[in-house]
Amino acid sequence: MQNKETVMGKCIELARSAKGFTLTNPLVGAAVIKDGKVVYGIHEKYGSNHAEVNAIKNAGENVAGSELFVTLEPCSTYGKTPPCVEKIISSGIKKVYIGVLDINPKHRGQGVNILRNAGIDVEYGILANECSLLIEDFIKYQTMKQPYVTLKTASSIDGKIACRTGHSKWITGEESRNLVHQMRGSSDVVLTGIGTVEADNPLMTDRRNEAVKQPVRAVLDSSLKIDINANIIKSADIAPVIIYTSENADNSKIMQLNDKNIKVVKVADKNGMLDLEDVLHSLYESGFMNVFVEAGSRINGSFFDKRLVDRLEAFIAPKIIGGNDAVSSIGGFGIDNMNNALTFKDYKITTCGQDILISARINDYTQQAVDFTKNFNAE
């Protein structure tokens, strides 16, 4: 017998390679143990075969009497693909090991019940914490009806993102910038503000040679003052663009942008700032599960003030900029008491070239899935 945790761990590792391609579907990895050999499969992209189906297919379809591992409870309803439980049952699998149960209200333990009623032995809770972490964005999307928000900063060691003159290229090194491109490519949406567009005229795309998909670009522009010839507008054929603006925006400018295949969405604004909750709700309604924020000090501060950031990717260059008028990475109102400071659930510190990268989880959505798995009693 293969070590259960080792097999499930490999399923988790392989599933991560599909990040950015599954849209509102979770990352899932699976494995079939046939004649002592382990064969893996993952859910590669939205609308394609689920991980269990791919693992069975990769094992040669003739898997009667074999064991199946899967990081997430097999689905039991029709969607883009048929229910995975049907494939498992018809394949003659004798036992299924599950990492974590599905908190999607449509499923929630039904897969376990269906498999057991079909005479298949089911064991769940294998590396439940790790399997839940793999789908933390999906858990939030399902339970809170909001996309998962990752915010990236790139600053000097004294927290500055630009000199007092506004000059900012480049604070971090090439390795860090390449990793940011990868982060864009694995996100559904990259969100920035009009200030960044005006200052840097960026594309906000994944420009690595190996890039295979581009994120949707979203711009917060309450006054709709974006230049019609901005790079982000001219590249709408490469990757879609959504501009969020206030309810009293100039309709003629909206029509002009629409003619260039730019989607403009009006949301509420408060004190001259667009309502970020409205923006995130709009992105959720549009079917986006992962939002990557790459903006300036003001927008970064607003996201933190409203406690809307789930994960922080902070690149820190070994440089000192200094100056009272130099721009800090996070603006906004901030806190007035250290007891209210935002803390991390956990974090990891690595190096990226000569830069330091702090990857921190701010919110934890995994526990509800772990608890549900632990306390579930099959019918």
Image: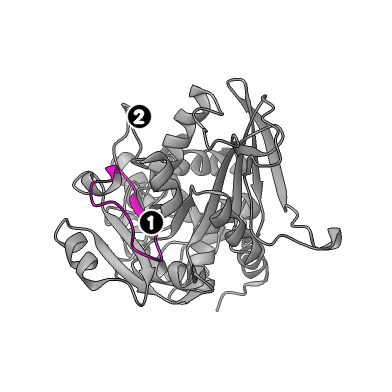
The disc, 1 or 2, on the residue closer to the chain's N-terminal end is 2
**Number of residues whose C-alpha sits closer than 10 Å to that of mark 1, classed few (under 14), some (14–19) or many (20 or more):** many
**Quarter occupied by the C terminus:** bottom right
Please give the name of the residue rendered at 24% of the width and 52% of the height, measured from the top-left corner.
228
Q: Give the left or right position of residue 100, taking residue 54 as reference.
A: right
The three-letter code of the residue at mark 1 reads Val
Q: Secondary structure at mark 2?
A: loop
Q: Which mark is residue 219?
A: 1
The three-letter code of the residue at mark 2 reads Arg
Residue 221 part of the magenta-drawn span? yes
Where residue 314 sits: x, y (%)? 62, 40
Q: Magenta region: which residues?
A: 214-231
Total numbered circles: 2
Q: Main secondary structure of the magenta part?
A: loop
Front residue (pair 273, 5): 273
Please give the name of the residue rendered at 46% of the width and 40% of the height, measured from the top-left corner.
183
Please give the name of the residue rendered at 64% of the width and 39% of the height, measured from the top-left corner.
326
**Quarter occupied by the N terminus:** top right
Q: Is residue 192 visible?
A: no
Q: CA distance from mark 1 to mark 2?
A: 22 Å
Where residue 233 sits: x, y (%)? 25, 49
Front residue (pair 325, 23): 325
Hey, which quadrant is residue 256 in on the image?
bottom left
Q: How is the image coloured?
A: one colour
